[in-house]
Amino acid sequence: MPQHPMFTQKLSPALAHQVLTHGSQKTSQVIIETMGLRADRILAFVEANHGKVEKEIRLIPGIAATLPNAFIADLVRYPQVAKVWEDSQVRVLADEASPVYGGVLPQEYPYTGKGVTVGVLDTGIYPHEDLTSPENRILAWNDLIGEKTAPYDDHGHGTHVAGVIAGNGRASHGRYKGVASEARLVGVKVLDQTGRGRLADLLLGLEWCLANLKTLKIRVINLSLGTRSQGLRDRDPLIRATTLAWKNGIVICSATGKAGMEYLYTKSPGANDKIITVGNLDFEKTLTNEDERLLQGLQPEEQRLNHFTVPDLVAAGNNLVAVKVDGGYCSYNGPSTAAALVSGATALILEKWPVLKPEQVKWLLTRKTGDCGLGLQLQGGGVLDLDKILGKPSKTNASQNQAGQMIGNLMKSALNLFSKSASGSPIKINDLLLIALPLLNQFLNRREA
């Protein structure tokens, strides 16, 4: 394929490799970054050359399109074209759902994320009881895949992530509770039923969050997903988009891989050193000799340039139970869950200190950590440790809170029974006992634990 001098300058390395490898007979999904918002000539060029304009993106700004490779060399000649990127595949960063093992088990901190809104850009959010009762905490919804108006999740990953962040454990009587059980959620569906999507939709999801920032008051965005880095880290469109959100006061928590060999695969936006990147800590795995050999002698910046991703911190994201589609609970493993833990922790921090800026939140999360002995290259600043940030919760206060909650539940149940009696149904002492005894047993079991 003949190359115009602008070919290598205006094409991202990933796209240039793809075009040269696949040849002129193939088509590519691209994001055409333009010089300014007006791109009439570019739109006309795409349509005139057997291409298809998919979506317009104002955040970069740019155009998502499908275009035959044969015409890409001509496209880059236009002065309105700043850069042409691969519209790369984005996917969830977690293993498949598995049966229930163990819950998140958050400490009984006096903070619940109340008043803090967390955006979840993922496969969607199913309106599980733990997220919608006694009040619906799914504050807003935007579906960039199926364009449906009501929240749903045809995969399950996004729902689980939302549950780790903000599930209140209602359906399990408090057993499977998220980190910030009163935080509000904003669901943005950017991935399909297979857990995959396109970079363009992820950029549009971030664009929508920024456009509605004042209305929704989003303080945190969770990105338990990733796409391959296209090189040129300071110009990568996703890294630039997440940096812009960060500068607008949104704490971005992104999954980036788990301890060990998976750090070899650089993910965007996980390579963004501005945001909070989270690795998964699997306590059952240790470093191998091969890991040590590959990491030996490399500084953090060199690791990034050599396709290593160094996290800011790690969290234990294995075998954590949270809500699943159609009710009930399931367990996912991987960096997706680890990032969700940190997003939930961020909601608690912002409830305690609402005026903190993203940089200050990052400082707390990465400086007040535990050490699991894996070294800077694998554990970053260390292991998430909320006790060091929020202070150890008082067991006395926790027991008092549980007792108060139990008594409150009993009073509500008794009032319901009295209400029934007023309508003509007699109250029986057995009715009260049937309600009181399970709650009392649950409270006593928690105290013994």
Image (tube, helix red, strand yellow):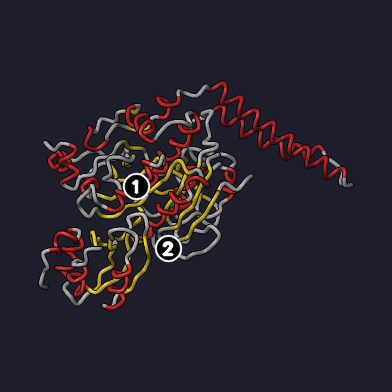
Image position of 421 (left or right of 258): right
Q: Is residue 338 visible in this depiction of the protein?
A: no
Q: N-terminal of the two: label 2 or label 1?
A: 2
In the image shown, does 103 or 263 lie closer to the viewer?
263
Residue at the disc numbered 1 = 242
As displayed, is residue 316 above or below residue 159? above
- Front residue (pair 164, 43): 43
Mark 2–mark 1 distance (CA, rounded to whole Å): 24 Å
Q: Quadrant of residue 284?
A: top left
Q: Nearer the viewer, mark 2 or mark 1?
A: 1
Q: Which label was assigned to residue 303?
A: none
Q: Residue furthest right?
A: 424
Residue 249: x and y in percent read 41, 39
- Give how far across and how far down residue 34 sits, in percent: 28, 60
Between 427 and 359, the residue placed more toward the observer is 359
Position of residue 324 in the picture relative to residue 407 (left or right): left
Q: Amino acid at mark 1?
A: Thr
Quadrant location of residue 69?
A: bottom left
**Residue placed under numbered mark 2 in the picture:** 193
